Amino acid sequence: MRRPTILVTGAQGQIGFELARLLLPHGEVVALDRAALDLADPDAIVAAVRGVKPALIVNAGAYTAVDRAETEPALAHAVNSRAPGIFAEEAKRLGAVLIHYSTDYVFDGTQTSPYPEDAPTGPQNVYGASKLEGECAIAAAGAHALVLRTSWVYGLRGRNFLLTIRRLAAERDELAVVADQFGVPNWSRALAEATARIVGAGLPALAARCGLYHLSCTGEASWHDFARAIVGAAPRPRIIPIATADYPTPARRPAYGVLATARFEAAFGFALPDWRKALANCVGSPAETA
Ligand SMILES: NC(=O)c1ccc[n+]([C@@H]2O[C@H](COP(=O)([O-])OP(=O)(O)OC[C@H]3O[C@@H](n4cnc5c(N)ncnc54)[C@H](OP(=O)(O)O)[C@@H]3O)[C@@H](O)[C@H]2O)c1
């Protein structure tokens, strides 16, 4: 049987980089980074999809600079709202399946128990609003699409909290870290592995399970908990808990963003590990620096 062609975007991003390798057993992977495909250019997206003619599109590219988005709303909208809608329209036209990622930042963060998929949304910043619009654009296109919301993505490459804390830990004796925002850290590779696993069941099976899912490790952490877990048993640096109010940022962040994952587990028959286990796996893994 002919292997399906799989188009991956954001190929140099945290999740996209892992996907480009992990999807290889499941098809002919065409992985496009920013230089190969500018997601802010609608014509380029249409040309890329029509040229590649994929059976599966995995859109891992996104505008993820949460603070900068406050001053670049048009670009955030183009990449996070318009581009996913175009991918969905093109997927529908081709009869392809679309997998797209979204975020816990679509929620307002006032809940104190894990958010199910159908909980009311209420983004608190431009990034969250642009991602929510992307979800809506995909739904409106009526393609075979799976939207996987996740949170607090980290890994051994790119820009993320793990690497920032490691760098600062080498420079300072004390780190002040926000202790009143709660969520779940997710290793990019665990998310990509889960994606590859659901793709591995076959595209018809995937198409039959279209919809919105929360894909996340289990457990719960504050940024302070996450920083402490990264630093581990080392006596230095001391990790000092602080309040969000003491660490002002351009974008407002939800205080709570834990995602309930029961729908994903029921549909696909597996769950991601506890976030501490995934973190241990990540820090014990060989660094991916390509
Ligand atoms: N990071 C998180 O904490 C987090 C949390 C929840 C959900 N998510 C979602 O998970 C998905 C993957 O995120 P990630 O963590 O892998 O993000 P990432 O590491 O920032 O990767 C995103 C990739 O998209 C690329 N990109 C940005 N603007 C582009 C453009 N105009 N044209 C082409 N490529 C462009 C980036 O390139 P440059 O590096 O050159 O900018 C980057 O390689 C996204 O949908 C994101 O919204 C992420």
Image: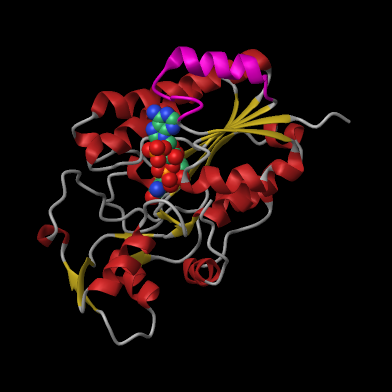
Inspect this view and state whether residue 62 appears. Answer: no
Q: Residue, x 57% and y 66% (percent of image)?
A: 286
Image vertical order of residue 237 relative to residue 134, above or below = below
Q: Name the one closer to the observer, 47 or 249.
A: 47
Quarter of the render that holds ligand 1: top left
Q: Position of residue 33 (x, y in %)?
A: 50, 34
Q: Name the one closer to the observer, 52 or 87.
A: 52
Tell whether 151 sits left or right of 249: right
Tell whether 237 sits left or right of 19: left
Image vertical order of residue 209 relative to residue 254, above or below = above
Q: Position of residue 58 (x, y in %)?
A: 58, 34
Q: Where is residue 117 in the image (x, y as percent from the top left)?
A: 46, 43
User: In the rendered image, which quarter is residue 74 located in?
Assistant: top left
User: Which span is picked out in magenta?
Assistant: 35-54
Q: Name the one closer to the observer, 290 or 34.
A: 290
Q: Residue, x 30% and y 37% (percent of image)?
A: 127
Q: Does the magenta stretch include residue 39?
A: yes
Count of numbered marks:
0
User: In the rendered image, which quarter is residue 285 located in?
Assistant: bottom right
Quarter occupied by the N terminus: top right
